[in-house]
Amino acid sequence: MAEKNGSFVVGFSRRPFFCLFTMTSILFVLSWFFVLRSTGRTDFIDHSLLPNSKFFSTFDDSNPKKQSQNVEPSIGNRAILGNNEGVEAHQETETPRAKDVLECHSYDKVVLKVFMYNLDPQFHFGLLDWKPQGDSVWPDIRNKIPSYPGGLNLQHSIEYWLTLDLLASEFPKPPNARSAIRVHNSSDADIIFVPFFSSLSYNRYSKTKPHEKKSNNNNRLLQEKLVKHLTAQEEWKRSGGKDHLVIAHHPNSMLDARMQLWPVMFILSDFGRYPPNVANVEKDVIAPYKHVIRSYHNDSSDFDSRPTLLYFQGAIYRKDGGFVRQELFYLLKDEKDVHFAFGSVQKDGIRKATQGMRSSKFCLNIAGDTPSSNRLFDAIASHCVPLIISDEIELPYEDILDYSQFCIFVRTRDALKEKYLINLIRGIGKDEWTQMWNKLKEVENLYEFQYPSKEGDACPNDMASCGP
């Protein structure tokens, strides 16, 4: 497992950077740095509301002074708390980090300095068929932005949006307020960003095309080139890669290089396909998917105008932890007001899913081949209260967001009990559901990726949301 406090933290200021993270409503770039300090106090978050959180388990194991008490279930956590027996509240003594959270309003402007490698376009915008002009390896995004492929490709497009924001930070009048800026001297940087569009590389080069007997190996070759290039750089030799950040959001991206680059900080969708010595909550960040369903603007719906009680549409037969999908299908398919059906992006699937989620009170988010799914973020965008059945899921921002305020968590073993799930959600009344629905509308911007970024989204553009 990577060291918690590598040499790259020397000279960093703990208080300003953690404060900036809170002030900007989880500025994504700053969250990279925040994770490095994730062993500080987190008792202002009740992690007992989250199912089998690996972060919570790590925190638990490191604290021998646990105290057990009964906790009254709040909206969103009634299912996972069950009969409220054995729920533990974890306390730690006061640390400077907790104090920083309370005092963060005293910092007006703190900027994260990011050094970004000028990698050959084959690693980034060249994957979008962009051709460089002259000596520059970057497109002039003031004139034209290379477009990203749509459909399911978008769900793992985080590297694209963050790279655009860093490039824009150098404009005389940037579209953001320079919460993070690109610097050209790595000695001045707080973090080293590797702009490899790894998810796009996997999607483009690793899937067998209809006329091919097997997929080409361009994705593997790119990873080999990347490892060779990075490990030869002075920045890498100086830190051993510990201050480098690599985005590998698609669970199958960086399969060949991840073992060689493991000291880096990864941005991932979950830890489902990573051994703990390669990726873990001590050094890495879990990031949202970009939702595929459009945001629900001007949502005037309410409890009574959403006729479907529970909605799921997607692949039903999955591997590993996804076995629960087919079990739930047989339990729920004949229930009144429940839509549980196979679906895909083909044949107008996204439009149908949009209509279905917007007309449903609760949307199932069930583990698939890995613990996470884009369906959770589609549900948030649709203001459909997520019902999460995924025991090993790690959630974006869960150290500072109380997901129990807008999600329902159910353990797999409970969900598979006859009538358990349907009785649970039928017991949630209009007032409780409306509170969660309102909270969804409050937090939805935290899951938005766009260019230019806007205040309060996953890559916010200024510090206007500063608060204690």
Image (spheres, grey):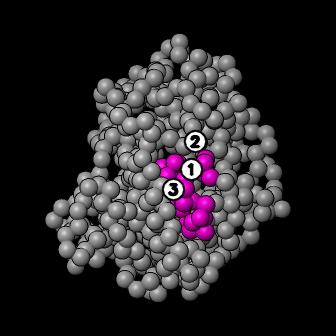
The picture places residue 322, in percent across and down from the top left corner, at 59, 33
In 3D space, how far apart are the residues under numbered discs 3 and 1 (Cα atoms)? Answer: 14 Å
* Magenta segment boundaries in residue numbering: 247-274
Give the labeled residue for mark 3.
254
Q: Secondary structure at mark 2?
A: loop
Q: Earlier in the sequence, mark 3 or mark 1?
A: 3
Q: Is residue 462 above or below residue 223?
A: below
Dots 1, 2 in contact, CB < 8 A: yes
Q: Which residue is mark 1?
A: 270
Residue type at mark 3 is: Met
User: Is residue 251 highlighted in magenta?
Assistant: yes
Label 2 packing within 10 angstroms: few (<14), some (14-19), many (20+):
many
* Residue annotated with mark 2: 370
* Residue 402 among magenta residues: no
The mark closer to the camera, 3 or 2, is 3
Q: Residues within 10 Å of mark 3 (few under 14, many from 20)?
A: many
Would you say 467 lies left or right of 282 here?
left
Sequence-wise, the earlier of marks 3 and 2 is 3
Mark 3 or 1, which is nearer the eye? 3
Residue 158, quarter of the rendered image: bottom left
Residue 307: percent from left, percent from top: 40, 21
The quarter of the picture where residue 197 lies is bottom left
Along the line of sight, which residue is nearer the eye, 6 or 387?
Answer: 6
Residue displayed at 35% across by 65% down: 163
Q: CA distance from mark 3 to mark 2?
A: 16 Å
Q: Which three-letter amino acid code belongs to the residue tagged 2?
A: Thr
* Most frequent secondary structure within the magenta stretch: loop
Q: Nearer the viewer, residue 125 or 3?
A: 125
Q: Please give the name of the residue rendered at 65% of the width and 64% of the height, measured from the top-left corner.
A: 282
